[in-house]
Image: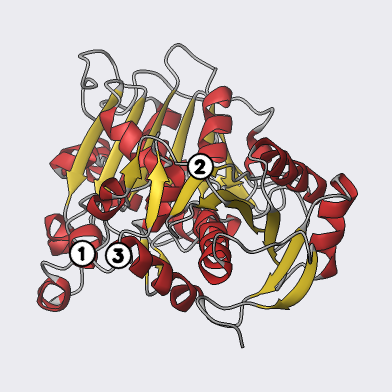
Amino acid sequence: MNEMMRLARDFAPFAHAHQRPPALAANGAPWRTWLLLGGRGAGKTRTGAEFVRALVHGHAPFAEAPHGSIALVGETAHDVREVMIEGPSGILRTAPRSERPHWTNMRRRLEWPNGAVAYAFSAEDPEQLRGPQFDAAWCDELAKWHHVEATFDMLQFGLRLGLAPRALITTTPRPIPLIKRLVADARTAVTRAPTRANAAYLAPGFVDEVLARYGGTRLGRQEIDGEIIEQRADALWSRALIEAARVAKAPPLARIVVGIDPPGSGRAGSDACGIVAAGIAENGTVYVLEDASVQGLSPSGWASKAVALYRRRKADALVAEVNLGGDMVRAVLQQVDASVAVKCVHATRGKWLRAEPIAAMYQQGRVKHVAPPLAALEDEMCDFGLDGLSSGASPDRLDALVWAVTELAERGAFAGPRIRSLWDGPLTPLGRR
């Protein structure tokens, strides 16, 4: 009877192929990161919960020995609690009663009867991961994390306990740079699964319904088939369009400006500050020179970076959006350097409407990118559709580009910004209101 009960609650014999940990990474060595890419409802969360339970008790094939300190990392604290821990497929709901850990919400930790502990972390605050150490981790929906690079980096420094610390990442894929790097990393073990692989455990008709509605579309390929789609079908820019616009160097430029899209919050750790330099030649062609965008800096920090680019590029003006920051944006830039020419602009239309005429300029061959590739900026451009970026994050680099190119297109090569170095007024692409 005891053996039958143990078998009934043993996940491994009943797991799908994509829910079983690969023996080795692509390089033939034991994997450090297991990346499970799957469509909606493919069983990713259940895999993560069972992975953690197996680690705690040292159950094969997930673990060779018990683990004592585990990190649970999700997009937000709410997601960690409601999906990874307390959700229908979460750790508490799937654990047998005799093995169920105790969840202390105030301390953000799970404690098992055998002494193992799992700690909950949010990708909203990467600094939470500075200090703690672990012998394993489960990261859920990494492609949605707003501070994905910083959070992932901090976690790697914390995976330093035990003989072979390792992490499971369960996520619906999106073409973010980190996902692409992990897939290409020979130390990563990758498993994939479409939604239909877990159809027996989903509502009747669900798979047929979503396939009928979204099958073959970009959204369907990503959310149902679990594919990494490198370029959005509805994006304003394409990879081919940007590659066609790339040049080795810019000609002499009549005017250079630095576009700035300040973060909505003045505290460190908020959205990135978009900082992009562009110039215009005498023939009216605009050249995008540099993306110096930064994240996690205070107002004085990002202002110093913007002014440094202004000086290095010998720019004529800093063009800064002030919808959220108001007078603070201008004040903080002038505190860094009172002599800089600052032009404050206000967004009176949505991001798509502001970006659309700039995309048209690319199609007309009127904007060029100076090599080497501006990778982070170009990723945003090729991922920007009617609903913004697929991650839901703010397109800070793209906004800064739009402000810089709009200013140059409106005022031309021979505008004299230093005659009116401080000018406040609404600006919309290709025409004032």
Residue at mark 3 to residue at mark 1: CA–CA distance: 26 Å
Query: Which numbered disc flags the more N-terminal residue, 3 or 1?
Result: 1
Q: Is residue 217 above or below residue 431?
A: above
Residue 209's spot in the image, x, y percent?
14, 78
Q: Which residue is mark 2?
A: 252
Q: Amino acid at mark 1?
A: Arg
Disc assigned to residue 218: 1
User: Mark 2 packing: few (<14 Cα in 10 Å), some, or many (20+)?
Assistant: few
User: Mark 1 packing: few (<14 Cα in 10 Å), some, or many (20+)?
Assistant: some
Look at the numbered disc 3 and give the secondary structure of its residue: loop
Quarter of the rendering containing residue 25: top left
Query: Which numbered disc flags the more N-terminal residue, 1 or 2?
Result: 1
Which residue corresponds to the image point at 48% horizontal and 55% vertical from the top-left?
Answer: 282
**Mark nearer the viewer, 1 or 2:** 2
Query: Which numbered disc flags the more N-terminal residue, 3 or 2?
Result: 2
Asked whether the beta carbons under mark 1 and mark 2 sit within 8 Å of each other, the answer is: no
Residue at mark 1 to residue at mark 2: CA–CA distance: 41 Å
Residue 191's spot in the image, x, y percent?
21, 38
Quarter of the rendering containing residue 158: top right
Q: Which quarter of the rendered picture does the C terminus lie within?
A: bottom right
Q: Nearer the viewer, residue 337 or 212?
A: 337
Which residue corresponds to the image point at 69% horizontal and 52% vertical from the top-left?
Answer: 316
Asked whether the beta carbons under mark 3 and mark 2 sit within 8 Å of each other, the answer is: no
Residue 109's spot in the image, x, y percent?
62, 43
Disc assigned to residue 364: 3
**Mark nearer the viewer, 3 or 2:** 2
- Decide if residue 20 is in sight here: no
Q: Which quarter of the rendered picture does the N terminus lie within?
A: top left
Which residue corresponds to the image point at 20% horizontal and 64% vertical from the top-left?
Answer: 218
Q: Is residue 51 above or below residue 194?
A: above
Q: Is residue 358 above or below residue 157?
A: below
Q: Amino acid at mark 3?
A: Gln
